[in-house]
Image: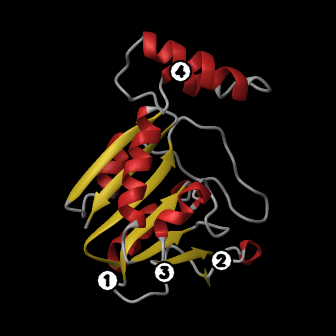
Amino acid sequence: MTSWEKFYDDKLKLIANCQSILDVGGGIKFGKYLEKYKNLFGDNEYIVLDKEPKYKPDVIGDIHDLPFEDERFAAVHCNAVLEHVENPIKAVAEMHRVLKPGGQVLVYVPFLYPYHAEKGVYKDFYRYTKDGLGYLFRNFSNVEINPVRGFFETWLYFLPKVNKILAPSLGRFLDKLVKQSGNQASGYQVYAVK
């Protein structure tokens, strides 16, 4: 297990243990790598919100104007969504608003990552640096930002047709040999507490 897989695993276990969880932009219920964690959620309330009806979310809505009262949820999960929203500052403010005091948020965003809009469904607007994420989540009391992938694995993902073979094997091997600062990551995970 890589350091970023462990970070996500550890933080998702905390989130899944919360009584009420909102998955913002989650698409299909327990989609986006959550299927293997499904049993951890137990009987806790788990609501998926997405603006795209074709995914059959529990609630159709917009991250810029979440249709929930203040302090409604104990946790929010938001995986690979903020790059697709027009106003990420408003989106993060909305997640903060619907969290209870002490509530947790777990977010993944890309940094060095290919363009990936889906025509007619969502556009691809932004990439995030560690500094930008610190600013976006500045109203949270505790913020942890964790890089995903190292320099070599990140850059090998840009090679056409061989990326899924070389990136995880050769890229991870090279990243272990050559230690870097974490500033050349493919993306970042953010765990924050309100």
Please give the name of the residue rendered at 46% of the width and 32% of the height, measured from the top-left corner: 2
Mark 4: amino acid:
Arg
Q: What residue did someone put label 3 on? A: 65
Q: Nearer the viewer, residue 169 or 88?
A: 169
Residue 6 appears in the rendering? yes
Tag nearer the camera, 3 or 4? 4
Q: Nearer the viewer, residue 49 or 172?
A: 172
Please give the name of the residue rendered at 39% of the width and 43% of the height, measured from the top-left corner: 7
Query: Distance between the Cα atoms at labels 1 and 2?
Result: 21 Å
Label 1: element kind = loop
Q: Nearer the viewer, residue 88 or 159?
A: 159
Q: What residue did someone put label 1 on? A: 71
Name the residue at the top extreme: 177
Q: Residues within 10 Å of mark 4 (few under 14, many from 20)?
A: many
Q: What residue did someone put label 4 on? A: 172
Q: What residue did someone put label 2 on? A: 57
Q: How many marks?
A: 4
CB of mark 3 within 8 Å of CB of mark 4? Answer: no
Mark 3: amino acid:
Asp
Q: Residues within 10 Å of mark 2 (few under 14, many from 20)?
A: many
Query: Distance between the Cα atoms at labels 3 and 4?
Result: 39 Å
Query: Distance between the Cα atoms at labels 2 and 3?
Result: 16 Å
* As drawn, 112 above or below 134: above
